[in-house]
Structures are given as structure tokens and as C-alpha cells.
Image (cartoon, helix red, strand yellow):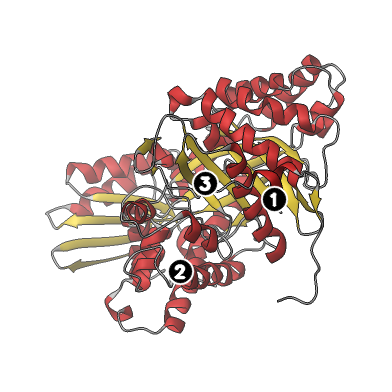
Amino acid sequence: MISNKDILETIKMIRGENLDIRTVTMGISLLDCADADIDKACVKVYDKITRLAENHVRTGEQIEKRYGIPIINKRISVTPIAMLAASAKGEPVKFAYALQKAADTTGVNYIGGYSALVHKGFSAGDKELIESIPNALAETSKVCSSVNIGSTRAGINIDAAALMGRIIIEAAKRTADNFCFGAAKIVVFCNAVEDNPFMAGAFHGIGEPDCVINVGVSGPGVVRSAISKKEMQDADIGEIAETIKRTAFKITRMGQLVGTEAAKALGVPFGIVDLSLAPTPAVGDSVAHILEEMGLEKCGGYGTTAALALLNDAVKKGGVMASSSVGGLSGAFIPVSEDAGMIDAVKAGALSLEKLEAMTAVCSVGLDMVVVPGDTDVDVISGIIADQAAIGMINNKTTAVRVIPAIGKKEGEMLEFGGLFGSGPVMPVNRFSPGKFIKRGGRIPAPLQSLRN
Amino acid sequence: MRAVITVTGRDTVGILAKITAACASANVNVMDMSQTVMQDLFVMTMLADVSKCNIEFTALSDKLKECGKEMSMEVHVMHEDIFNSMHRI
């Protein structure tokens, strides 16, 4: 029999340390739903999603009961809609309505893929789709959007960075009476991955099978608890890394089990486990608190980047061995509004936007759920996007920007989203303008892969 | 299929009797069990064969949870694979 100690450890992780499966996301290809008539295409989209995901939520709930492990979100990601918009004439926002309707029918809480991939340039449908994003996000509640504007192999599309700065501000303005939430549903990527199960940036890449199950695990609380044990108080850095690895292994094994069971029950292939440590605003479920547990007075002070690099790498090392297939974003997320420790650090003046930017060079994604003043200039937002993309492009990693201009709010005020999205303090922004640079337009060429200094 | 049933809470009279009676009525065979008291906290773990269970697994889980609630105990019924996958390589 399994030892009592192991059984109790698992139960303690789930009950006391917020261990959960953050999301089981079904990826669905919509390439066969393209049609020259947009209304026909929308019907095909709705029909295909509701057919394949009919039992998605129910299966998730059954697995939850069977293994006694909470699965917080059941979600769907689809082929970037710009590809369907390319062949259909008409308002792309109709696709957003079809996605919302399909999400309502299947019972998932978010559906991602109102997306375009424009890292090397815009093709048919891309600009129309991007222009429709503020409208689509204001008029739907479950649709999420992402745009990939750069990659290590293609460089950075500065025209797209300029465009996305404006789109983010418009999305915030369109939803100003709803905590500017539109902007929280857009992610601007560099090196976007095709199998990410996490919102808002999930989309179903074109290299993926027709239908697939991807799982995102969580567990900052478990990692923090593991390194806060009495015997770890005098541990050196190597021992801290070892402990994180061991913990990540256990967390990931659970994700692997849930993913394979869900895929088997639904009769679709199992894709990947995303190893991300995804924080929530709940007490004890914070990535910032892990860093502080390692010995930082406050997240954001000097040493933070080093501690985060250690954490991110140890999570990957532990997780890789636990799963047959690891993918997605896999690492530690640092969303400010969703992490109680990050919020505290901003309020205390320890964590600035500049430090967050440095942290994105070693974390799994990028500037995430960062609230900036509502009157931030559009060129400044585009500059933030370009800087993040540059970090991703040069370092061969995914980076992303999810900033929320808080319309009508100033530095120091709070924007309350509620639920998993938490609340974000409005952070001060460097307002010197990158306007001329951004307005030059064009593309930053792909970087050299040798002479790596 | 085998499940791990854990019961935790303050020690009281008749915990084992009630849980095993509930298992028996659902045609669940208890294969192994152990119990210990850690700092006032009563902990009982049981390995049970639920392959011939006459109700749905989720119903069994709810039933035992309810049974635990009556004694102010927390009961978890979980498929054994979750422990095997987390704690075995």
C-alpha cells in the first residue's frame, strides 16, 4: 500500500496549499471550417466546436471527482481566426460571436484563438481581424485574443507593435465601465507557442492535430511550502533548487495523469503538460512569496531576477522527467494582479515596471496583467511591446505583453477585476516617447544565432 | 479499480464502523487499512476495491463524505493512481 505519509502529503497539497490543475484545454483545428461566406463559416465553427467539446466540461468534472483533484478551468483553444477571416468576406467579429456561442453551449469559461500571426508581415485577413479585436472583446465575455508580432527566426514586426499599442488602448476604452477588462483578454506575443493551454494567449497552432488535450498545472503554494519547511531554513541554494525540482515533479505527474485520463475519456490525443507555476490572488498561492521565501526581503529588490531564474529552471528540470510530453509556456508566471505577493511588492515600492521587464528575461512569459495609467501614450505601449518582443527574440524564448491601461485612473490607484484575475495597482510608466522609432515602421531583422554575447 | 479513502479529524467513537458499513452497503471491499493519531488528529487511510461497487464512483465519494460530515470528519475518496503517479517513478 502507498504510505500514509505520501497520502497525507498529497491531501495537504490539495487542501492546504492550493494545488490544482489550473486548466484542461481542448485544442480544436478550425482549418476545415473556412468558407468564402462568413455566415456559413461561423456555422461550421460553432458546429465543430460543440461537436468535439460536447463532453469536455463533464469529463473534467468526472476526473475531478475520481481523483479528488480540483480542475479550475475547462477551456478551448482554436486555430487563429485570422486564417478563416482570410477567405471569408465580411466583419470578422462574427467569428467572435460564434466562438462565444460555442463557449456558452459547451460550458467552458474561456475560448482562445481570436488571433493573428503577423511576425513577418500582414496577410489577408490579419489587419481586419486585429482592427476588430476591441469590438470583439467588448461584445463577448469568453473570447480571448492574441497576436504574435515577432520571432527569433523572423524578427519583430514594428508595424504590428505600433498597431497593437492602439488596439490595447481601444480595447480598454471600449470596456472602461467593466474594469477595462477587454485589455486583459489580449496578449501580444513574441515566439508564441502553438500548444499553450493558458488564457488569454491560448490558440491552436497550425502544426497541431485536429483535436488535442493540453493541461496546465499550478502549484506556487506547494513549492513555497516545500522550501519553507524547518529543515530548509539553513539550506544552501543548491538544496533549494533540488527541493523545487522534486516538488515540480510531483505536481507535473498529477497533470500528466489528468491529461492522459481526459484524453482517453474524450477519445482525442493527449498533447502536452504545461509546467507553469500559475499564481492566483489566494493567500499562499503566490510566485512572489516563493522568491521571498528564498530569502528576499521583497520581490522586486536586487536578487529577484536571480531567484526567479533559479525557480524557473528548477521547475522545468523537475517537470520534464514527470511527463511524457512537456510544452506550452512551462515556467513561472509573473502576473502582477493575480499574485498577492506581487501586488504587495508594487504597493511597497519594491517592484517597478523596469524590474518586471528584467524578470521577463528569465521567467516563462512576460509582462502579464500589468496595470498602467489610463492616459499612457499609445507609442509608450507600443514601445513596451517592442522591448518585450526584443527580449524574447534575442533570448529564443516566448515573451508576451498583457498590459491594461486603466482608463480614468492614475498611478497608485487600484483596478479591481475580481476572481482569478485579482486586482492591479496602477504602476508608474516611463513616459519619454519612443514615438519616432515606432512610427518608422518596418521590421527588426532576425537576430544572429552565433556570437552570443 | 482501487481507491484510497482517507478520514481525518478529531478522534471519536465508531468512525471505522460507520465508514466500513457505508463501504459494505456499496459493495466496496476494504483491502487494507491503517490508522494513527497525530497530535490529536485522527488519521485513517484505507485501500478499497471499488470495481464491484454498486453505485457510481462519484456517488460513493459523496456518500462517504456525507458519512464523515455526520462525525465532523473530513473524508476523501481518491483513485489510487493519483498517489502512485505522484509518489512513484
Same chain, marks 1 and 3? yes
Give the number of the mark in front: 1 or 3.
3
**Residue indicated by mark 1:** A192
Position of residue A17 measured from the top left corner of the image (x, y, whole percent):
34, 57
Residue at the (49%, 45%) spot, across then down: A369
Task: Determine the secondary structure under disc 1.
Answer: loop
**Residue indicated by mark 3:** A431
Dot 1, how many residues are within 10 Å of its Cα: few (below 14), some (14-19), or many (20+)?
A: many
Position of residue A211 measured from the top left corner of the image (x, y, whole percent):
73, 41
| Residue nearer the viewer, A145 or A451 | A451
Q: Give the residue type at disc 3.
A: Arg
Q: Give the residue type at disc 2.
A: Thr
**Residue indicated by mark 2:** A247
Task: Determine the secondary structure under disc 3.
Answer: loop
Position of residue A53 measured from the top left corner of the image (x, y, whole percent):
64, 32
The disc at residue B59 is none
Task: Determine the secondary structure under disc 2.
Answer: helix
Tell me the chain of label 3: A
